[in-house]
Image: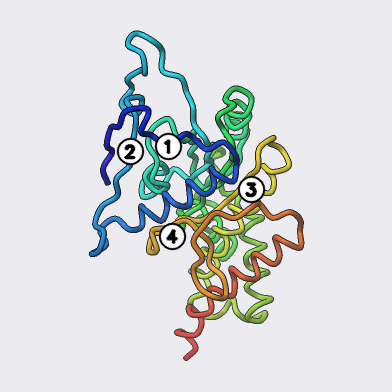
Amino acid sequence: MLWIERPEGELRPQPSSDAEARERLDAGSAGFASVGAADTGRLEVSVGAGAFGLPRTPGAGLPQEPFAAVLACSDARVPVELVFGQATNDLFVIRVAGNVPGTECVGSLHYAMANMASVKLAVVLGHSQCGAVTAAVDALLAPQTYLQVVHDPPLRAIVDSLLAGVRMAALALEAEFGADVSSAGGFRDALIAVSVVANAAITATMLDRDLDRPVVYGVFDLHERTVGVGSRDGWSPGLLAAPADDAALAALLTAAAAAQADKFTADRG
């Protein structure tokens, strides 16, 4: 992945709308996924001098001009700018374990919306195999593991904030595969996968009602190496609009649960 400095006149203008911002992020995600492929091999990102901390005019300041604000997980395997194929000063990134919308994180988003007109879109980015979501899943499946975090209030706050999404994911799997699915091999992995989607979607819905910019969400899949969401038809790359209501959220979780069929088929077959 190469950053190549270009004259300002040769750079694409920053997105002028949320639709353009979303399109830029989806294209960047697809480009990142292509890195290492036999037919392409590398991704080139054209940047201005500002990407290296250099002002446009010598001696002048460097303005902060991101086109999207991203609430993402702190996981080291998910470098947000790289995942979206963007450079510095393109994204205003808030990272916390489990991409949970705590007070400080939401306050940071409020700051971005209030002080940077360049921000056209807010994004909630989850990822597969999330350790924080896994801890919440294990707290539901094996409550004794919760004792490992109960005496650590800051860590417990993160796990507690994820439990509602985990429970909704469990109900979606039961509705799709039957009440006894929790006893099937593969259930824990399936529950983690659906809980990651639930957490991102729920957070996006909450932020969509709170922020004055459109909100989208997605999951970075560590195997697919793109941002998207799984469904009955397989992996679907691309960011999605925040669910508008409970029915839309339920439909999303049903589709995410159905995407886990192979985990149970392999076990039961």
CA gap between label 3 and label 1 equals 28 Å
Helix, strand or loop for disc 4: loop
At 50% from the left edge and 44% from the top edge, which residue is drawn?
72
Q: Is residue 170 above or below residue 155?
A: below
**Identity of the residue furthest to the top in this view:** 59
CA gap between label 4 and label 3 equals 18 Å
- The spot of residue 261 in percent (x, y) is 53, 79
CA gap between label 3 and label 2 equals 30 Å
Check residue 204 in the rendering and tell me which mark sits there, or answer none: 3
CA gap between label 1 and label 2 equals 9 Å
Helix, strand or loop for disc 3: helix
For marks 2 and 4, the one nearer the N-term is: 2
Please name the residue that numbered disc 1 is placed on: 12
Describe residue 35's horizontal placement relative to residue 240 as left or right.
left
Q: Nearer the viewer, residue 209 or 97?
A: 209
For marks 4 and 3, the one nearer the N-term is: 3
Residue type at numbered disc 1: Arg
For marks 1 and 2, the one nearer the N-term is: 1
Check residue 221 in the rendering and tell me which mark sits there, or answer none: 4
Residue type at numbered disc 2: Ser
The reply to whether the C-beta atoms of the residues labelled 3 and 2 are less than 8 Å apart is: no
Please name the residue that numbered disc 2 is placed on: 46
The reply to whether the C-beta atoms of the residues labelled 3 and 1 are less than 8 Å apart is: no
